[in-house]
Image (tube, helix red, strand yellow):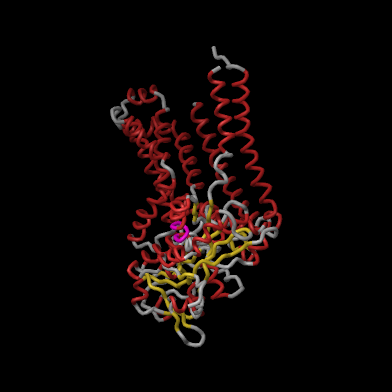
Amino acid sequence: MKAQHSVLCLLASILLTGRVGADSMLKLQGSTTVNPICAEAAEVLLKEQNLACTVDPQGGSAGGLSALGDGLVDIAMTSKPMSDKEKARYPSLTFVETAIGLDAVAIVVSRPVFDGGMTSITREQLRDLFEGKVTRWSEIGGPDLAVFVYDKEPGRGTREVFDHFVYGKEPPPLVSFRNYAQVGGNEETRTKVAAHGSAVSQLSASWVEAEKGLGALGVKLADGREVRPGEATIRDGSYPMTRRLNLVTRGAPEGGARVFIDFILSPKGQDLVKKHGYLPIATQGP
Amino acid sequence: MHSRGTSVTWTISLALSFLALAFLAAMTGFLVLESIPAFRARGIQVVVDPFWSPPHGRYGALSMIYGTTVVSVIALLVAAPLGILGGIQLSERVRSRWRPWLKAGVELLAGIPSVVYGLVGVSMVSRLVEASGCGARDSLLTAGLLLSVMILPTVLTLTDDALQAVSRPTRDACRALGLDDTATILHGVLPPARAGIAAALLLALGRALGETIAVFLVVGRADNRLPPPRELLSALSDPGQTLTSKLGSTEVFQSFADPEHRSAIVGLALILFVLTALLTWSGRALLRGSEAR
């Protein structure tokens, strides 16, 4: 009798646990670039307004949008504009992208490459580099070190901004070469490029720290100007790989999502954006 | 005299066991049905095409099958000799005072979650590979070596089990014939344990084949790497891709946007499922065979 009783209780509890705690939390998912801002905002909001949030940098911008469209999360954090293809996946939904900050994609190299003279790059050189046509940095004006390419995985906001700059609307060509590996989020990219010693990758501009073994390349534009990623060049758009950081919702933000987004857009929230190295979105004129 | 218990308990137990079978059937059904579109569109190309590039409509698994094979073979080549020798030591040479501790230790290692091995791999193993001058940190070789560390305890403990299963009379007979320790092991104990050891290797290989997190972290995730024969050896220290590292990546979620892409991804899972099932069944069959003796 006792054994039957326990088995029945166990079954009942298994069936019930699925129902508990499903809807009470505000869920965010997406870009590792936007993540630090939202993670800290979540802490502040919990303390000040008792709003509980979970912030998950799984899957980057594309992962976040997927989860948002599937109804698994309330807000997607993205570092790239939503593409028509992505919108077409969910024809019954209207997505609203609220810009909360500005950032740029930097072409980052290991410090020895930067110190050895490789400080800027043209679009064509970038294409050759990421297609495996350049094997030593000396071929494009750098030191005599072997090139290693760490490519951001497709779907990441950083990667899509890069592809858009280098290839426009065409997909990158199908190439395969030996000195190539893929990286995921910003943290992994930074660690691997710095540790390697002569590598290149795409990284959010604010994540580049010289003392951590990285150098950000300037981009040589078609008219001969060289633009380095910095506050001025990002704001006026002269640096070609600038992007807005967005919080995306299904329809206009409401409830907990509205509270969260309003907070990020408030002066306190924008301070958080600045604190993590990004540029605040200029909502008021000078 | 065993009682079957009351009919309620019996019914619930029966229902739960059928639940397990139903789950297996559902999973197999899902894998087969969802990947049919990919196989229908491309037929055998899904398996033999070395190029995987969704933007270009290429969904070939060959480079990944190659990667999975290479990584598993490296793991087995390192873990098999060490594991078998270690198992022999544990079974035949270790004094009974220490045996319980060592056996417990090995089984503990065999049970450590793979993500822990992955993190260890990222910090230690890839540094070793780089220091030895073999090239990039993340590579098929790094993944293979990390996997060998993971499956070594499994090979060791199963070899020990196989040897322990050899009966006392067999060992006594060897002693009676005047054989020393080494001869006893080589000619008396190992031969009957052959099937059990082969099963151990197959099961360990099955685990290596399916390992995702650890491989994902250190294999480099470079698609379309299928080196020409003359580069095979040197390409071991280049980044690559395995079936599991592809399935463990975010591409799986992105593939849901495109039915063709999604079907191909499930096809990869099916290939992996079939390979692992074949290995596991052969391993179990061998184990049953050896125990029957």
Residue A59 is at least partly visible in this image = no
Q: Nearer the viewer, residue A77 or A109?
A: A77
**Residue A197, horizontal then vertical, whole percent:** 36, 68
Residue furthest out toward the bottom: A223
The image quadrant of residue A135 is bottom left
Q: Nearer the viewer, residue B71 or B251?
A: B251
**Residue A285, horizontal then vertical, whole percent:** 50, 76
Relative to residue A9, is residue B77 drawn left or right?
Answer: left
Q: State how many labels appear.
A: 0
Residue A19 higher or lower than B75, as above or below:
above
Q: Is A39 a magenta residue?
A: yes
Residue at 59% in and 64% down: A97
Q: In the rendered structure, which segment of residues is drawn in magenta?
A: A36-40
Residue B105 higher or lower than B243, as above or below:
above
Q: Nearer the viewer, residue B78 or A140?
A: A140
Residue B51 is at least partly visible in this image = yes
**Residue B89, horizontal then vertical, whole percent:** 33, 35
The image quadrant of residue B18 is top right
User: In the rendered image, which quarter contains the N terminus of chain A?
Assistant: top right
